[in-house]
Image: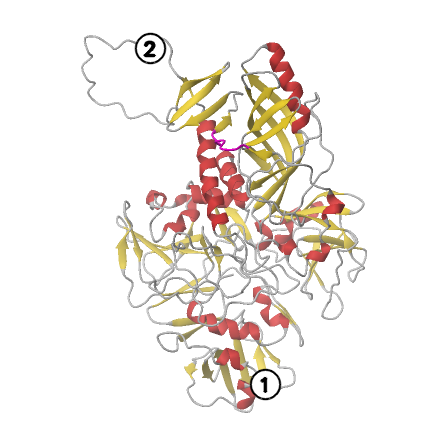
Amino acid sequence: MRGASRMWRMRGWGGWAVAVAVVLPMVSSPANAQITEADTGWPREIVTDSGTMIIYQPQPDKLDGIALTGRAAVSVLPTGSKEPVFGVVWFTARAQTDRDDRTVDIDQIVITNVRFTGGSADQALLTRAMVNPKLTHWQFTIALDRLTASLAEAAAEQRSADSLNTSPPAIIFSSSPAALLLFDGQPLLQKVENSQLQRAVNTPMLVLFDAKEKTYYLNGGPLWYSAGSALGPWTSQKGKIPADVAALVPDSVQSASPPPGGPPAIVVATSPTELIVTEGPAKWAPVTGTDLLYVTNTDRDIFRTLDSPQMYVLLTGRWFRARTDAGPWTLIRPDALPADFAKIPSASPRADVLASVPGTTQADEALMDAQIPQTAAIDRKTATLTVSYAGAPVFKQVTGTSVSYATNTDTQVLRINDMYYACDQAVWFVSKSAKGPWVVSDSVPKAVQTIPPSSPVYNVKYVQVYQATPTVVYVGYTPGYTWAFPYYGTVVYGTGYVYPAYVSPLVYYPPPVTYGMAVRYNPWTGWTVGFGYGTPFLYAGVVVGPRYYGGWYGPYGRPPYPPPYYRPPYYGYPGYRPPPPGYRPPPPGYRPPPGAPRPTPYAGQGNLYGQPHNRARNAPPSTVGMSPPRARPVSGGANNVLGGKDGNVYRKQGQDWQARDGNQWKTASPAAPATRPTTPATRPTTPAARPTTPATRPAPVPADVTRDYQSRERGQQQAQKYNNGAGRAPQSSQPRQPPQSRPTPSGGAGGRR
């Protein structure tokens, strides 16, 4: 829901009646609904003729697709009563996510159980009669940060994508300015329209060939290079560039400020490669409180351990290890990292890597977010699709499956059992012909789930159809669609496989790639991609030429790849254009100063369904249901009451816990630690007289309650950070400039997505 509250929002009360397992009629508020509401906070209060009910922030237990289960603490003060009755309500519901507003709408609620403590039997019966049917008419909105924090604590299992490729890329170090010129295999040339020049189409950079001069030219904004071969060596060109070559690059690109430090060296690669640049020889410094060292004069994540000669480098969320920077490098599973990585302080300049260390709060939340779908309601009438092929449709079998995919189109088209399915912008379409006509599909063939990561259409298995009506289809996608996958307690980017491109005399459809884009994750700004010193080269390459030249960065048909600006969960969008030359992204560990707006993506970037070119597909709110009345916030009410899985009600008062016992609150003790302290070798002398044992010990607080409280606090902090930064994409597309005192980005960590 656009502009919706970032906390759970309850909406709608029809009348209180008695029924526990009641399914709501569909009253939805999907991601495309244009409804705005201020953040009203928790707890919430509903006042009716029957009495007053207060609902505390719900505690989600599990999210399976769009099916959410959880519980919430409530208190009810029937009319004429002096003391409220406290209880716990269990529910199941449907969850719809809007990653632009970072909210999750909850509807279609089923009340599965209600338990109240205290009061007489008659009062408890009356309370149940008031609560059960009323709750079934709720519609909530919870901040995505709140939901992620809660589910991260509740998750009992962490799934990993199967069979990701673990082969390391080539890792090249440079202690002086350098930029990576990456080709997808050997350079491929195609004629530039209305010109005698040719262009290398299998690189995102602008590489031109002048056959008359037998010279290649590489543009990096104000910089020009020349070479006798596309593979180099490349020499900075200070002389005059041929007029027909220079004419292809807009003056606005060539007039940009040159990068600091002079023209960078050009490093050429034709296979998966990562370039790491340091400002001079590597400078090592200790990580406080650990036996780790890290390199300070680079924006890449490089570590050593004091007790071994091993180096560790983090690339695309994956850890690689070698004895020296010359390699050989091997992938190490994140759950096999030395224990000191989990001890990196949250205030460390390299604290961002904690999201790639299993068992940390940052990793748990990133992992849970990777399983939360972005959803939308798609209008069957307005959602259309046209698929263009380079010639007649050509299909290739996915090994080991009954699925074939089209290779000569920038739309993902599958052939399954003589039917054709197209996944476009996270919406499934179906047709009896490869050329259409296409209509919105209200199901996904089971064979899609058999597609392995070795296939370039692997990501479509993360797009689902949840429900369908004669007019609307409810769809959603998880970050796997934008190529971010769970991996042994963390999240990584890309599958690691090298996919084939489609090449013809007229077009080049680039494949998705994992390496070469300096993909890295920051819990504040999310996944970023760029080229550091190569940023102006990237900018020139995408600005100049037909749309498929920019295919590496999200063609209009293929899903975005490399990654979007993904915080989790900002997903990129097709048609992405990188930032202007000279832009530097926030360095590792960067956090805006207090009070500064939070970095945000370009408008609508967090939700593919919210992109301007996709909005016509979305069903209007009138089609999917109107919002019922909303409960009002409790004036001055503290959001400190929780329901335990044991059915009891607890609250946190300052540093103390209390449990509801009958009609009063009684002191409760914190949950016992998971492990007991080591027994000392020598026991202290037993005192002559033991202190008197209290007649009644405080009741212990269940561990699930204390965990829920901690995650609630953490989610509140994250939601406040988002809200304080306005949480909206800026009207201007100019990225925020980071502090200038940090190291210059390395050869592969450039512009933000």
User: Where residue 408 sits: x, y (%)?
Assistant: 69, 66
In the displayed structure, 196 sits above or below 427; it is: below
Name the residue carrying label 2: 694
Q: Quadrant of residue 196?
A: bottom right
| Residue with the mark numbered 1 | 197
**In which quadrant of the rendered view does residue 625 lie?**
top right
Q: In this figure, what is the number of numbered marks?
A: 2
Q: Give residue 357's position: percent from left, percent from top.
A: 41, 46
Percent of width and height locating residue 260: 37, 74
Identified by mark 1, the residue type is Leu
Bin the neighbour count of mark 1 within 10 Å (Cα to Cα): few under 14, some 14-19, many 20 and up: some
**In this orientation, which residue lies closer to the viewer: 449 or 478?**
478
The magenta segment: 634-640
Residue 675, percent across and down? 35, 27
Q: Residue at x 43, y 85 (%)?
A: 237
Query: Callout 2 environment at 10 Å: few (<14), some (14 to 19), or many (20+)?
Result: few
State yes or no: residue 675 in magenta.
Answer: no
Using the rendered image of the protein, determine whether residue 252 is visible from the camera's viewpoint. Answer: yes
| Callout 1: SS | loop
Of mark 1 and mark 2, the one earlier in the sequence is 1
Whether residue 488 appears in this view of the structure is: no
Q: How is the rendered protein coloured?
A: secondary structure
Callout in the foreground (1, 2): 2
Task: In the rendered view, tell whether residue 209 sits above or below residue 331.
Answer: below
Q: Which amino acid does label 2 sit on?
A: Pro
Q: In which quarter of the image is residue 358?
A: top left
